Image (cartoon, grey):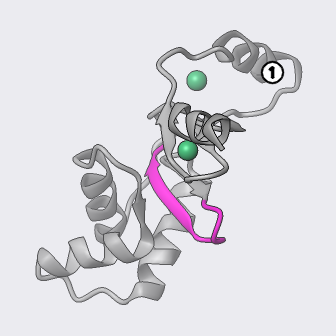
Amino acid sequence: MKEKLTANQRRILEVLFSSAEELSAQSLHQALKQQQQQVGLATVYRALKALQLIGKVQARPLANGEYIYSIASAHRHHFTCVNCGRSLPLQECPVHDLEQQLAQTQQFQVFYHTLEFFGLCQNCTQVNAAT
Ligand SMILES: [Zn+2]
Ligand SMILES: [Zn+2]
């Protein structure tokens, strides 16, 4: 499948590619502004949605209801602390085989997956134990 990307979609992808971190729509908007691009925030959201639909971008919801975005090919596996909100990336991908299996048995076109564990991080466990 070959898609034609708009200029804005391409710029957003470039920013996401060069960013080690997941970015909010606002940060992407800022980044485009710094490239002297006159793009409205609504346009950024539209471009992100379009990129999601073709499997180029993934969105992760934060606790506050906002989304942060990254390129779809980046694996996102996190351990998130329910106390301090710290998110630690997991290095291993435990569901790679399952993804392939699903793609075959469900005839579902899988773009990406995310995996998130919740609990207390080491710091917060220690604080809890001390009190
Ligand atoms: Zn914590
Ligand atoms: Zn994975």
Q: Residue 37, percent across and down?
A: 18, 82
Residue 110 visible to the viewer: yes
Q: Secondary structure at mark 1?
A: helix
> What residue sits right under mark 1 in the picture?
102
Quarter of the rendered structure image containing ligand 2: top right
Residue 114 x/y as whole percent: 64, 37
Q: Outermost residue, top direction?
A: 97
Mark 1: few/some/many CA within 10 Å (<14, 14-19, 20+)? few
**Residue 68, position in %: x, y?**
50, 60
Identify the residue at image location x=68%, y=33%: 110
Residue placed furthest toward the right: 106
Ligand 2 under 8 Å from disc 1 Cβ: no
Question: In which quadrant of the rendered view does residue 31 lie?
Answer: bottom left
**Residue 29: where, in percent of width, then height?**
32, 77
Please tell me which residue is depicted at 32% across the width and 52% down the height of the picture.
Answer: 16
Which residue occupies the foreground of this view, 122 or 85?
122
Q: Relative to 87, is 126 above or below?
A: above
In the rendered view, does 22 fall on the left or right side of 60? left
Q: Which residues are magenta?
A: 62-72
